[in-house]
Amino acid sequence: MRLVALCFLAAAGCGSALAQDACGNRGELDALYCDENRDLVADTPKDPRKLKNPSTLVFTYTPVEDPAVYENVFKPFTDYLSKCTAKRVVFYQVQSNAAEIEAMRSGRLHVGGFSTGPTNFAVNLAGAVPFAVKGTAKEFQGYNLIVIVKASSPYQKMTDLKGKKLAHTAPSSNSGHLAPLALFPKEGLTPDKDYKIIFSGKHDQSVMGVNSGDYDAGAVASDVFHRMGERGQIKEADFRIIYRSQKFPTSSFAYAHDLDPKLADKLLSCFYDYRFPPEMVKAFDGADRFFPINYQTTWEPVRAVAAGSGGGFDKATYDKETAKEKADAEAKAKAKKG
């Protein structure tokens, strides 16, 4: 009786609590989502009124490099997707992983590519459902964490970087931060002990920072590094790779969990049936299609790296890392002005 009275006085809050209690399993997902089938991603809402079938689909791609570059690269695909779904498709440029995750969480983003590490946060905090990775007929595309130094530098092995300036990219990045935390100590180099972590913001900025001498070394994704070489932004011969990790999956493509199931199924068909034109194949290192994946199994190595680094993919960790990234960016901006 008392519970009924309290609900009557605070209907919204109590209703929310009861709705959360109705979830049989949530796992690591945020309280907004449920995972009763235990596949680690958010279930489709049971209430039909919560399903979305927008007339305009908003698509984006992880800002590992200049977002404007990828808007042009994906233009053939977004034009095709519009025809395939019979809906208007717009490319939404995002400037950070945090902005991309928040866009899906708030309902402003319907489908897009998330970088490897941030994929886990997108799943747990924004209800993203990963379904594909760029690949070929045989396999999905992967990359390695590499550590680059200038070819003219004296650094030959990881322990040579003790006390030096080593750039990470962003706190949520797998290859740019989480993997280094988990893997570097085995190489005799412990982040934030043997060197101070400096966040560059993006993989290409780490590469360019090493090239200009702002950093002695950079932990970056191998695919981004090689693409920059192919585009002529850098000469790979000007660098030396002194560390290479195991293979990780590249950016995932995921849709919002609350899309109407018929629309979600149509999106999957459109993605899986599409074959990249020559310009996209070149831009994505020979990948020619969207390769079907399962988040629970394909991202297991990434989650293992996070566990090994002492991190997780909950909101508290996300808020802490986002705040750290923002503070570091502000400090760099202040230093430039000074």
Image (cartoon, grey):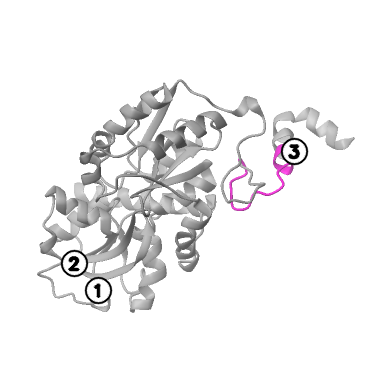
Left/right placement of residue 258 relative to residue 37 reads left
Marks 1 and 2 in Cβ contact (< 8 Å): yes
Determine the secondary structure under disc 2.
Answer: strand
At horizontal 42% and vertical 69% (from top left) the residue drawn is 182
Res. 144 image quadrant: bottom left
Q: Earlier in the sequence, mark 1 or mark 2?
A: 2
Judging by the rendered image, the residue that carries numbered circle 2 is 149
At horizontal 18% and vertical 54% (from top left) the residue drawn is 208
- Identify which amino acid the numbered label 3 is placed on: Leu
- Identify which amino acid the numbered label 1 is placed on: Leu
Residue 28 belongs to magenta span: yes
Q: Is residue 164 above or below residue 334?
A: below
Q: Please tell me whether mark 1 or mark 2 is closer to you in this view.
A: 2
Image location of residue 265, percent across then percent down: 51, 34
Residues in magenta? Answer: 18-32
**10 Å neighbourhood of mark 1: few (<14), some, or many (≥20)?**
some
Determine the secondary structure under disc 1.
Answer: helix
Judging by the rendered image, the residue that carries numbered circle 3 is 18
**10 Å neighbourhood of mark 2: few (<14), some, or many (≥20)?**
many
